[in-house]
């Protein structure tokens, strides 16, 4: 909904500021951009353009963009035609990472595109995955301020920002051991994205280049709030992680402002409406985590054995367009019949925000993507953390320190024989957290803190105003 935190700002020389957004690929990146853009657009006082590379990697992204432009017809779309990525060395690369690379390699085309925008752009807001390419274009070529909208937690931002210093000090080119981030603390080697152990991976190269350049940004907007990550935010702002770090604006938790996907969303929401308060375990592992078949079977056994009601979003492919599997084949014969009435399983996109907001939901068994965690925190839903990859373990440390969930640290998704998490253990932990009063009280507390942060005078409200003041 519209956020009253945004006082109209007049740009010097008259006219509303014109913000140009350059989002990256993957729903975990596009959704927070959409939410932030929607919040600004709801105010009706800014000119907004969104650089859009079509076709998107996933169907979910295509629908999200369509919903954004339909909800806010005044937003301008700047079409970004990517150069073909003919590079045999990239065969087999994750499709989203490949798109990041493709955006990066086409980034030099952005200068002329944005220079031609009317009214003249006043600032650029881009994603961290594009930072090292977009910041120099904004500053050197266009003489425009450039901000990053960081889509993960402040703890991950600290790690990203400090990582180049770690490499220089230890004289290495990859994650080679535990990392001690000043004022944040000791980060065990198995917490950051594990792909950083490989210096030759495309992700590692992008991550390091972006981490070095991010200090040149004019500001960094983070989808978090003070009460959720007080230490990390203070350390970053005090320049303790990296001296002279840009201003950090904690403006979360960001919420949806667009409408759309009602049809797909309605079945699970209607079903939740028939369930008792706080009785349902919501199970979902994000927009691009494909689970292995044997692990899916163990999850099904665990949910069945827990005796709890559940709503489970199953994904068997990285890109939604590729998913043609039949639920019955995936889950095994008879499962759906046995849990009929108390369990709903879907392969469709669900409106997760609406799910977490629903009073019937009592627990979120989650992969711990940052958007999911901020949504759970915002709506006071306790979490059972099962991080799968990337930043998700570092994110789980935020859940642990906030006390609003349980992270079973030895649960992994490595795929090896020993890494399979058995149904019996899943059932046990689900029941444990469902009955944990302390976790549930903490979850409620954090949701109240979230509401306070974005309300008038709250920490995120004030951060948003400070950011907007930089545009005038
Ligand atoms: N999401 C959703 N419905 C789905 C799957 C995902 O609404 O069926 C949303 C979810 O609410 C979150 C985002 O997609 O806002 C996923 O981002 P997150 O950072 O949690 O994880 P990722 O998918 O990037 O791993
Ligand atoms: N990231 C980053 N710099 C980069 C690329 C990624 O800081 O150059 C961050 C990104 O914001 C996220 C994590 O690294 O926090 C990547 O996580 P993952 O591999 O799970 O991919 P994603 O879910 O973001 O698509």
Image: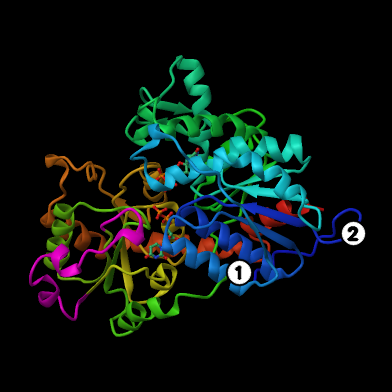
Q: Is mark 2 within 8 Å of ligand 2?
A: no
Q: Which residue is mark 1?
A: 69
Pinpoint residue 248: horizontal percent, then vertical percent: 63, 44
Which label is found at residue 14? 2
Pinpoint residue 89: horizontal percent, then vertical percent: 39, 31
Locate residue 384 relative to residue 415 in the image: left or right: right
Does dot 2 land on a helix, a strand or a loop?
Answer: loop
Q: Which residues are magenta?
A: 316-343
Locate residue 69 relative to residue 180 in the image: left or right: right
Pinpoint residue 151: horizontal percent, then vertical percent: 52, 50
171 and 108: which is toward the camera: 108
Quarter of the image where one finds residue 305? bottom left
Does dot 1 land on a helix, a strand or a loop?
Answer: helix
Disc tally is 2
444 and 2: which is toward the camera: 2
Against 374, is 1 above or below?
Answer: below
Q: Quadrant of the N terminus?
A: bottom right
Against 369, is 264 above or below?
Answer: below
Locate residue 352 relative to residue 213 in the image: left or right: left
Q: Residues within 10 Å of mark 1 (few under 14, many from 20)?
A: some
Q: Residues within 10 Å of mark 2 (few under 14, many from 20)?
A: few
């Amino acid at each position: 909904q519209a956020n009253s935190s945004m006082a109209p700002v007049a740009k010097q020389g008259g006219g509303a500021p014109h913000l140009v957004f350059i989002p990256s690929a993957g729903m975990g990146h596009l959704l927070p951009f959409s939410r932030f853009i929607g919040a600004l657009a709801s105010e009706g006082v800014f000119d907004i353009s969104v650089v859009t590379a079509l076709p998107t990697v996933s169907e979910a992204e295509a629908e999200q963009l369509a919903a954004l432009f339909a909800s806010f017809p005044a937003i301008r779309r700047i079409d970004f035609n990517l150069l073909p990525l003919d590079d045999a060395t990239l065969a087999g690369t994750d499709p989203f990472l490949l798109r990041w690379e493709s955006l990066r390699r086409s980034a030099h085309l952005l200068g002329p595109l944005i220079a031609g925008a009317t009214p003249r752009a006043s600032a650029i807001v881009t994603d961290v995955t594009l930072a090292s390419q977009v910041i120099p274009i904004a500053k050197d070529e266009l003489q425009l301020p450039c901000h990053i909208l960081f889509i993960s937690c402040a703890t991950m931002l600290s790690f990203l920002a400090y990582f180049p210093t770690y490499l220089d000090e230890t004289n290495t080119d990859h994650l080679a051991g535990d990392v001690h981030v000043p004022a944040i603390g000791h980060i065990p080697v198995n917490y950051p994205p594990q792909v950083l152990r490989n210096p030759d991976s495309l992700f590692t190269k992008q991550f390091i280049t972006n981490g070095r350049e991010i200090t040149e940004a004019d500001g960094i907007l983070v989808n978090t709030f003070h009460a959720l990550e007080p230490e990390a935010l203070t350390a970053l702002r005090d320049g303790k992680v990296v001296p002279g770090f840009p201003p950090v604006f904690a403006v979360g938790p960001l919420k949806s402002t667009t409408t759309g996907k009602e049809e797909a969303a309605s079945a699970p929401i209607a079903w939740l409406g028939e369930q008792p308060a706080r009785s349902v375990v919501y199970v979902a592992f994000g927009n691009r985590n494909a689970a292995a078949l044997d692990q899916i079977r163990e999850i099904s056994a665990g949910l069945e054995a827990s005796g709890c009601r559940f709503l489970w979003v199953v994904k068997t492919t990285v890109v939604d367009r590729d998913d043609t599997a039949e639920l019955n084949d995936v889950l095994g014969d008879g499962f759906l019949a046995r849990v009929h009435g108390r369990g709903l399983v879907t392969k469709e996109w669900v409106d997760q925000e609406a799910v977490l907001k629903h009073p019937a939901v009592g627990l979120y068994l989650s992969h711990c993507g940052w958007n999911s965690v901020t949504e759970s925190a915002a709506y006071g839903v306790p979490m059972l953390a099962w991080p799968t990859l990337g930043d998700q373990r570092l994110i789980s440390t935020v859940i642990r320190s906030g006390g609003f969930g349980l992270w079973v640290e030895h649960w992994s998704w490595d795929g090896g024989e020993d890494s399979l998490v058995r149904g019996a253990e899943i059932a046990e932990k689900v029941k444990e957290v469902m009955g944990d009063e302390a976790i549930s009280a903490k979850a409620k507390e954090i949701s109240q803190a979230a509401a306070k942060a974005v309300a008038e005078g709250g920490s995120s409200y004030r951060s948003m105003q400070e950011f907007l003041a930089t545009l005038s």
